[in-house]
Image (cartoon, helix red, strand yellow):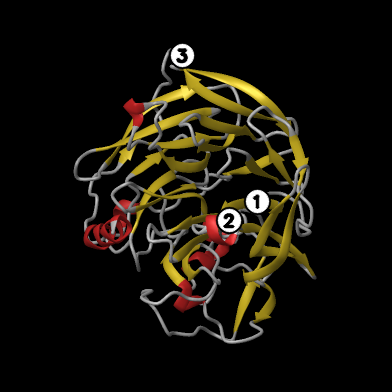
């Protein structure tokens, strides 16, 4: 009943639009941190942490592979991990436990799947088999894939499961190609809402609709203006019906690296902007979040981009960061170890080497709270079973850190 109530609240609140935009880019870090960070292990470009019920962690490594790690730092390589193309932003990316893991032992993976002409985002599901000193992914099956392949990074590759455990939300980055984020026929630059089997979910904004049988593919252009006339390098033909419209929940995203449901049932997302304009967005069905039409930023080559304030038909971020923080992921805290932070969100920072806390008022509106410099490029922050925070460092000698109160 509790899950149903949360899901119902999400639907009720979905019509509420947060109005004010806050630029938190100039926020100064706190003079000290209120926690201890202890490194317990070292990994090779770790990307995501997934906690098992017994407190051990599955940790993906972008270079390919996955480790089963104890809270004391002992590592066991996981067998039968799929092959990936580790290049640029691509590689072995997300690892997520099924919402019904206690019964099905399923694990979901997101990664850049190699193939002719490059790689593309794949979503797979496998059964995790644990032995006394072993771990393997068995019966792995790709349940969704982009298929376009080609050059360009920023795969997105984050998953959030609906509070009722019935649906899977998948973020798909724009692969630095920009214009596909506004093309309803392409999954790039979208958040998809799927069944747990990777099919279009009932009730999506364009449920039942099919897209074009083929779409143009471009290489990453220099900027948003060049993207408008970028040459088509090839045409991708879908192997079956193009279900992209029926899968799509929202559009106009750039690099959606964080996705999480708040305690009130609303869905939030963080993504990278270009030279400025990182965003925290309240995700509501059918909305267009503007990329690459608008941004609170400029292109990397300083070519201007229109401000979101010029387009009332597009949805603005709730918080943005100019200068950037380079968000790694987004979580909501409901643990016991830091009771003062219950209900807060945390964003990990890459370029900013920071951990940021965001608070929510009774109406659910978000405001930046503390920004703590931690001295490491933080790719992921997660909550352990006892309420400790765990963070991984984006490095070839990336630390796994346990975070506890001082």
Q: Which residue is drawn at 43% across and 61% down?
A: 165
Secondary structure of residue under mark 3 = loop
Label 2–label 1 contact, CB within 8 A: yes
Labelled disc at residue 406: 3
Left/right of residue 268 with respect to residue 49 in the rendered view: left
Rounded to the nearest angstrom, the CA distance separating label 2 from label 1 is 7 Å
Q: Which of 209 and 335 is in front in this view?
A: 335
Residue nearest the viewer, comparing 240 with 66: 66
Q: Which residue lies furthest to the left in this view?
A: 362
How far is the residue under mark 3 from the one under mark 2? 34 Å
Please state the horizontal and vertical placement of residue 69, each as a whole percent of the image: 68, 37
Using a 10 Å C-alpha cutoff, classify the residue at mark 3 as few (fewer than 14 neighbours), some (14 to 19) or many (20 or more).
few
Lateral position of residue 359 relative to residue 36, left or right: left
CB of mark 1 within 8 Å of CB of mark 3? no
Viewer-closest of 205 and 151: 205
Q: Name the residue under label 2.
A: 157
**What's the residue at 30%, 61% (across, down)?**
4
Q: Which of marks 3 and 2 is in front?
A: 3
Q: In which quarter of the image is the N terminus?
A: bottom left
Rendered image: mark on residue 313? none
Q: In percent of the image, x 40 and y 34: which residue is there?
A: 335
Q: Residue beneath label 1, please?
A: 93
Answer with mark 3 or mark 2, whichever residue precedes in sequence: 2
């Amino acid at each position: 009943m509790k899950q149903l109530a949360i899901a119902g609240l999400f639907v009720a609140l979905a019509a509420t639009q947060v109005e004010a935009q806050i630029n938190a880019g100039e926020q100064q870090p706190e003079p000290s941190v209120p926690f201890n960070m202890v490194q317990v292990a070292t990994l090779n470009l770790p990307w995501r942490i997934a906690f098992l019920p017994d407190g051990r962690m599955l940790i993906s490594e972008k270079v390919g592979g996955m480790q089963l790690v104890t809270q004391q730092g002992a590592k066991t390589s996981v067998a039968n991990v799929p092959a990936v193309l580790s290049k640029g932003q691509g590689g072995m990316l997300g690892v997520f436990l099924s919402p019904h893991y206690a019964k099905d032992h399923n694990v979901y993976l997101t990664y850049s799947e190699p193939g002719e002409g490059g790689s593309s985002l794949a979503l797979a599901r496998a059964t995790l088999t644990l032995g006394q000193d072993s771990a393997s992914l068995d019966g792995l099956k790709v349940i969704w894939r982009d298929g376009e392949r080609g050059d360009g990074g920023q795969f997105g590759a984050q998953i959030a499961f609906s509070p009722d455990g019935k649906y899977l939300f998948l973020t798909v980055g724009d692969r630095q190609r920009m214009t596909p984020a506004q093309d309803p026929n392409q999954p790039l630059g979208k958040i998809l809402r799927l069944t747990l089997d990777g099919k279009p979910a009932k009730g999506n904004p364009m449920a039942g609709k099919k897209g074009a049988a083929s779409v143009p593919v471009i290489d990453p252009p220099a900027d948003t203006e060049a993207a408008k006339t970028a040459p088509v390098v090839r045409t991708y033909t879908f192997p079956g019906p193009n279900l992209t419209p029926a899968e799509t929940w929202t559009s106009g995203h750039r690099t959606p690296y964080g996705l999480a449901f708040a305690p009130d049932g609303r869905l939030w997302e963080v993504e990278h902007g270009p030279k400025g304009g990182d965003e925290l967005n309240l995700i509501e069905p059918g909305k267009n979040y503007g990329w690459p039409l608008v941004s609170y930023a400029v292109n990397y080559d300083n070519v201007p981009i229109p401000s979101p304030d010029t387009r009332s038909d597009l949805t603005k971020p709730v918080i943005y960061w100019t200068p950037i923080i380079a968000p790694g992921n987004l979580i909501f805290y409901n643990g016991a170890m830091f009771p003062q932070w219950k209900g807060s969100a945390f964003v990990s920072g890459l370029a900013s080497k920071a951990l940021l806390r965001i608070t929510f008022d009774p109406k659910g509106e978000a405001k930046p709270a503390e920004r703590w410099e931690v001295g490491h490029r933080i790719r992921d922050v997660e909550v352990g079973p006892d309420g400790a925070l765990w963070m991984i460092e984006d490095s070839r000698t990336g630390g796994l850190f346990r975070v506890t109160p001082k």
